[in-house]
């Protein structure tokens, strides 16, 4: 049943994109790229040591791209993956500045594995805010949403200050992954990077504040788990 | 900003313009090598003077092309009177002007103004504008004896008595022509 | 001893003969190999592509009236092609893979053959992939049968190139990932602080807001920065030098073979007399500086009078790079590099087409010669003769790109260009074709009328007609549009004297017209000559229907 749901969602998203790609002419140039927005060591205020990454790669034409997006968080002390997410989506433009994307997501952290179908938009909002908004429906039928916004502030043409916010919300209680209905989590970041080799390698330092919200936070509190954390981060932004 | 659409306004504008230009001229010869009103004795001494037909022993034919003369150099004897027969075989207006390099340089500035204001076009001369009185007896009229300005197909004659010694050039001062090489040395022996 | 003497005399004579031959032999036959080469700028060493083992390739010389035969052998492991930029020839010889011919396969040889019907300064380059930005370019000089309408004692080709350490393919991939990948001239925090202290906080925020709303930047002038400017293959450090004797007239044949970069060219201490543009003679015009768009050529005459070195300074329009070379009376003498201009332009709302008082068609009427500013300005004019500089009608009124000569003197405008000898009788155009130059900087995709090349129908022209192209630049960048096979008569408001060009630059926020006498049957390319604009879709195929059957040309394609 779950699998059928998933396939239905997947087909609904992918079929129109695919048919579009087949009508596109063969001589459209194909491009590819790899970008790691975050690839960092996180030192928490309570001695946590994490390794965290968030990035993606794409291949495709102006009209249709296949994109992999991955993010993860590994607790170095415990040796476990707190978060491990991989998404495979097809992406096509819908306006001058925005693309629509759809595909599947597989979460394989410690604990429960989870399949999702996903649709979303990604693009550049007025005043140069990079926006990524995604909707997920899991194989168990639970739905959730995520909003990522980042802004690149140029201190100089090489020294860049990037504030970012990630907001997660669930549309139903999902105790299996310890999430409750409502806003579930926020992550605020501020990273100062310096482009040392073109835009390929840009080391950065920064600070990240992460907090569970609403009932999800209460749930964590009840269990005596942390519901907020602040990290000093340092890492590399990569683009190839 | 007003536009000078009427001929009258245009004439006034040009007069004012030329006056302004001449007023700040740094040149020793006020009007350079080719214009009425500023041709003084100093220049005559330097470059010679109009000659008489009776003194002519030699005629030199000068053909103007676009944008060059058929001759790159003219040799005259000291004090000789020469008759120049000049023909414009090109498709543009050209000048034949006897003067020093400095006089030519000044005259080029004036001709640039003439061209920018329509008194001179690439292939014709607007005589009515050239003859216009600029209010002090000066005109853009191109009637100095040491030079001729010829439309395509036209011919002209200059009889000129060269000085004892001088470093002279013959040149076309239509904008850009001198720099393109439409000039030559006059050497006196 | 004696024998040795004789031998040295003989070899001297041979050498002299060889020199004599090389200087007079306007050979009509050439063999070119397309090779991988190393391009050394003194700062970077990159693998590139050249001809006969070097980049730029050899200068090809012809005389009008000859038949040119050029055998091109491809030593690369990829297909190649050579396009003879600005040359009028049968379309099968035009060298655009997929339009004129299939291209030259690795290891293959193609023999180009065409009658040389024109004279002037031109160039050639690969029309395959990114071989041209990677180094596949060279000069073509065609001597007229009669003498030139100007005089010079010696001449030099001055080929400008924006050599980038990245390969062309990589540059485009990076631009596709991040359109401002190479833009290191963007406004920063300190610019913001400067603007706030100058203009106040509210105006500054509102100005930033206007740009932010459009998601465009006023610094979007040079897409691909980080290049080394080359003149004849030499970087400023390597200092290409042309020799002269004082008082000689030197003809400099400028060719902008760059992939992406417009250059502002000046020679401090010398006035330049422009005598030719895009291979066609123009009525001479004296300038202190000129801007050369990508793919254009300008021939200028200079007359250095002093026994000293003069610098040829070509700074890019966006001021992110420069090329430099010397003219010197002796070998080994080099000119001082003048201080680089830091007046990097900023686009304005006029460049965005926001100001409708800009030129359009009406700008042309303003050029009729008599509409100078006010009388008081005229009276106060200085005797340099130029007067208050006229607004250049080929820039949007209020444009941030309007160039100024560094010495305050004359900067060449398209409206200064007048044909020396018109190639065609002036007649009204039979119809007008509107070409809106469009694009999306954020996606780094460029197009014409909003449609990329892959999705577009060809432009169909009828043999014998005279079409009027109306270029409306709706983007914030300048685009040098190049029509293959036929001349583009730029409407500079000069009637029969309108200059005849092969590449027409259209600045942001402006509308420019050019007319073409459709006199070349076949299929042709028509595109923006900025490499990465062309590659992403600002390109059209032109089909000329009717006209004399184009004889199937015998060529050596193998």
Image (spheres, rainbow, N blue to C red):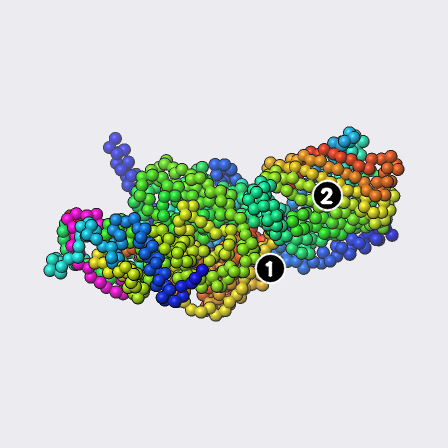
Q: Is residue C229 visible?
A: no
**Residue C406's image quarter?**
top left
Q: Position of residue C271 (x, y in %)?
A: 36, 48
Tell me, for residue C248, which label it has, or none: none
Magenta stretch bounds: B150-168
Q: Position of residue A122 (x, y in %)?
A: 70, 50
Q: Position of residue A156 (x, y in %)?
A: 59, 39
Q: Which residue is mark 2?
A: A165
The chain holding disc 1 is C
Q: Are marks 2 and 1 in contact (CB under 8 Å)?
A: no
Residue drawn at point x = 85 percent, y = 50 percent: A141
Horizontal side of A32 relative to A45 (left or right) equals: left
Classed neighbour count for the residue bearing mark 2: other residues with Cα under 10 Å, few (<14), some (14–19), many (≥20)? some
Horizontal side of C339 relative to C143 (left or right) equals: right
User: What is the spatial separation of the Cα atoms under label 2 and label 1, in whole angstroms?
Assistant: 35 Å
Residue drawn at point x = 54 percent, y = 62 percent: C435
Quadrant placement of the N terminus of chain C:
top left
């Amino acid at each position: 049943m779950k699998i059928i749901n998933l396939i239905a969602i997947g087909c609904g998203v992918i079929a129109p994109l695919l048919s579009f790609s087949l009508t596109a002419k063969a001589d459209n140039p194909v491009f590819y790229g790899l970008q790691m927005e975050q690839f960092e060591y996180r030192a928490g205020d309570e001695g946590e040591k994490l390794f965290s990454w968030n990035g993606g790669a794409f291949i495709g034409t102006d009209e249709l791209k296949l994109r992999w997006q991955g993010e993860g968080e590994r607790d170095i002390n415990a040796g476990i993956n707190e978060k491990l997410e991989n998404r495979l989506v097809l992406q096509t433009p819908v306006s001058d500045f925005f693309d629509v994307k759809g595909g599947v997501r597989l979460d394989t952290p410690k604990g429960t594995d989870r399949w999702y179908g996903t649709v979303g938009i990604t693009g550049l909002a007025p005043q140069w805010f990079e926006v990524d908004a995604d909707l997920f429906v899991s194989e168990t039928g639970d739905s959730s949403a995520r909003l990522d916004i980042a802004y690149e502030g140029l201190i100089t043409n090489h020294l860049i200050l990037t504030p970012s916010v990630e907001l997660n919300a669930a549309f139903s209680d999902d105790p299996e992954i310890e999430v409750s209905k409502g806003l579930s989590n926020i992550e605020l970041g501020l990273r100062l990077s310096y482009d040392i080799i073109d835009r390929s390698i840009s080391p950065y330092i920064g600070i990240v504040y992460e907090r569970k919200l609403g009932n999800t936070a209460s749930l964590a509190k009840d269990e005596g788990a942390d519901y907020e954390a602040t990290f000093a981060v340092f890492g590399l932004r990569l683009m190839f | 900003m007003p536009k000078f659409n009427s001929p009258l306004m245009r004439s006034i504008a040009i007069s004012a313009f030329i006056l302004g230009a001449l007023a700040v001229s740094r040149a020793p010869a006020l009007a350079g090598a080719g214009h009425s009103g500023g041709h003084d004795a100093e220049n005559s001494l330097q470059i010679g003077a109009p000659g008489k037909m009776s003194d002519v022993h030699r005629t030199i034919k000068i053909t103007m092309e676009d944008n060059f003369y058929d001759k790159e150099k003219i040799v005259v004897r000291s004090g000789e009177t020469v008759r120049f027969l000049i023909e414009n075989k090109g498709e543009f207006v050209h000048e034949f002007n006897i003067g020093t390099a400095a006089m030519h340089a000044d005259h080029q500035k004036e001709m640039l103004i003439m061209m920018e204001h329509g008194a001179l076009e690439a292939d014709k001369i607007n005589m009515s504008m050239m003859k216009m009185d600029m209010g002090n007896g000066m005109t853009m009229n191109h009637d100095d004896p040491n030079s001729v300005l010829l439309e395509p197909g036209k011919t002209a004659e200059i009889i000129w008595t060269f000085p004892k010694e001088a470093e002279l050039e013959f040149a076309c001062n239509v904008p850009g022509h001198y720099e393109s090489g439409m000039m030559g040395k006059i050497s006196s022996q | 001893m004696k024998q040795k003497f004789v031998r040295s005399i003989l070899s001297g004579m041979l050498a002299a003969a060889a020199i004599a031959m090389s200087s007079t032999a306007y050979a009509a036959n050439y063999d070119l190999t397309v090779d991988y080469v190393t391009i050394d700028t003194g700062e970077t060493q990159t693998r590139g592509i050249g001809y006969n083992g070097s980049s730029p390739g050899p200068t090809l010389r012809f005389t009008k009236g000859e038949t040119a035969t050029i055998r091109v052998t491809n030593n690369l492991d990829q297909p190649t092609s050579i396009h003879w930029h600005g040359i009028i020839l049968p379309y099968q010889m035009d060298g655009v893979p997929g339009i004129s011919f299939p291209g030259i396969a690795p290891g293959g040889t193609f023999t180009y053959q065409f009658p040389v019907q024109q004279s002037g300064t031109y160039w050639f380059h690969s029309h395959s992939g990114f071989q041209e930005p990677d180094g596949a370019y060279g000069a073509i000089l065609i001597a007229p049968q009669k003498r030139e309408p100007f005089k010079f004692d010696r001449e030099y080709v001055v080929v400008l190139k924006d050599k980038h350490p990245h390969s062309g393919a990589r540059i485009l991939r990076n631009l596709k990932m991040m359109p401002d990948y190479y833009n290191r001239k963007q406004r920063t925090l300190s610019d913001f602080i400067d603007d706030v202290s100058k203009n106040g906080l509210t105006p500054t925020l509102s100005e930033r807001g206007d740009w932010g709303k459009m998601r465009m930047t006023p610094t979007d002038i040079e897409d691909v920065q980080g290049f080394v400017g080359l003149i004849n293959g030499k970087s400023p450090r390597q200092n290409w030098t042309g020799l002269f004797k004082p008082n000689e007239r030197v003809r400099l044949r400028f060719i902008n073979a760059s992939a992406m970069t417009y250059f502002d060219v000046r020679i401090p201490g010398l006035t330049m007399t422009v005598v030719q543009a895009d291979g066609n003679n123009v009525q001479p015009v004296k300038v202190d500086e000129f801007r050369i768009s990508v793919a254009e050529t300008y021939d200028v005459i200079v007359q250095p009078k002093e026994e000293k070195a003069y610098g040829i300074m070509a700074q890019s329009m966006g001021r992110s790079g420069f090329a430099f070379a010397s003219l010197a009376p002796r070998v080994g003498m080099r000119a001082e590099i003048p201080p680089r201009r830091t007046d990097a332009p900023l686009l304005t709302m006029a460049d965005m087409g926001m100001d409708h008082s800009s030129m359009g068609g009406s700008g042309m009427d303003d050029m009729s010669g008599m509409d100078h500013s006010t009388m008081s300005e005229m009276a106060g004019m200085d005797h340099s003769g130029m007067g208050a500089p006229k607004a250049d009608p080929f820039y949007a009124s209020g444009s941030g790109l309007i160039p100024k000569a560094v010495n305050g003197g004359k900067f060449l405008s398209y409206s200064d260009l007048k044909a020396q000898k018109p190639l065609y009788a002036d007649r009204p155009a039979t119809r007008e074709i509107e070409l809106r130059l469009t694009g999306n900087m954020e996606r780094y995709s460029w197009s014409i009328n909003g449609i990329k090349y892959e999705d577009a129908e060809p432009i169909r022209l009828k043999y014998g007609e005279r079409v009027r192209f109306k270029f409306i630049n709706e983007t914030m960048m300048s685009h040098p549009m190049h029509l293959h096979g036929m001349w583009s008569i730029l409407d500079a408001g000069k009637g029969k004297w309108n200059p005849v060009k092969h590449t027409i630059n259209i600045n942001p926020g402006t509308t420019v017209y050019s007319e073409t006498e459709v006199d070349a049957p076949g299929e042709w390319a028509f595109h923006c000559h900025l490499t990465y604009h062309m590659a992403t879709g600002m390109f059209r195929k032109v089909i000329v229907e009717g006209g004399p059957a184009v004889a199937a040309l015998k060529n050596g394609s193998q």
